[in-house]
Image: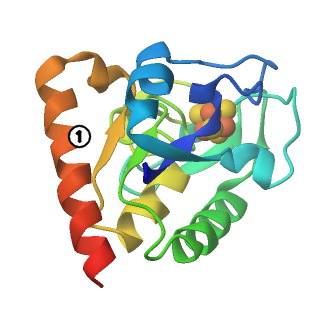
Amino acid sequence: GRIPVGISSCLLGEEVRYNGGHKRHRYVEQVLGRYFRYLPFCPEVAIGMGVPRPPIRLVGDPDAPQARQVNDPSRDFSDALRAYGREQAANLDGQISGYILKAKSPSCGMERVKVYDVKGMPTGQGRGLYAEALMARHPCLPVEEEGRLNDPNLRDNFIERVFVYDRWRRLQ
Ligand code: SF4
């Protein structure tokens, strides 16, 4: 059977983004989908933010940022996103052999997500809060972002790591 892999649900065409849109990625869906059985999650919808919703961004210390509403920084979703991330990551123990995350998202982004100060000036780069919780609990899980999978070398490397991890996972 196909290998179970978690994914940011907007990458499969689900209309869960803040603006009601999606970020369908054809290669991920149609080509990798021949090998992977996807388990889609949208953390922002899961914590009840709704669709559409005001966008959020990372604010503060790039190593420990907060996720705040862009047009009203008093609205802080950090605790909810981190709590959901921890709960979801625990639910996925032993259940998946890889994860494909949506790049640049304050929730799902794996790396280089822009972080701002309270005035909206960029201060650095961090990791989405959901991705942070997921990767903290599953440090060896193969994780990639959709944009990086356009690179044939990174793509082959990811597929290989998923197959290896899957073999290991099924022996546990
Ligand atoms: Fe939801 Fe993550 Fe996609 Fe944003 S990037 S719409 S939080 S799945």
List x then y, in percent, for residue 44. 72, 45
Taking depth in this image into account, of 126 and 120 the one nearest to the observer is: 126
Taking depth in this image into account, of 101 and 133 the one nearest to the observer is: 101
Q: Residues within 10 Å of mark 1 (few under 14, many from 20)?
A: some
User: Where is residue 165, by image quadrant?
Assistant: bottom left
Q: Is residue 102 above or below residue 76?
A: above
Instruction: Describe the colour scheme in one phrase.
Output: rainbow
Taking depth in this image into account, of 63 and 44 the one nearest to the observer is: 44
9 displayed left or right of 111: right
At x 30%, y 85%, the residue is 172
> At numbered mark 1, what does the secondary structure look like: helix, strand or loop?
helix
List x then y, in percent, for residue 82. 60, 64
Residue furthest to the front in view is: 1
Taking depth in this image into account, of 127 and 71 the one nearest to the observer is: 127
At x 47%, y 76%, the residue is 93
Give the mark count: 1
At x 28%, y 16%, the residue is 150
List x then y, in percent, for residue 140. 24, 65
Res. 139 visible in picture: yes
Q: Amino acid at mark 1?
A: Ile
Quarter of the image where ligand 1 sits:
top right
Q: Is residue 9 above or below residue 89?
A: above
Q: Is residue 19 above or below residue 83?
A: above
* Mark 1 lies on residue: 159
148 displayed left or right of 70: left
Res. 140 visible in picture: no
Q: Is mark 1 within 8 Å of ligand 1?
A: no
User: Where is residue 59, by image quadrant?
Assistant: top right
91 displayed left or right of 151: right
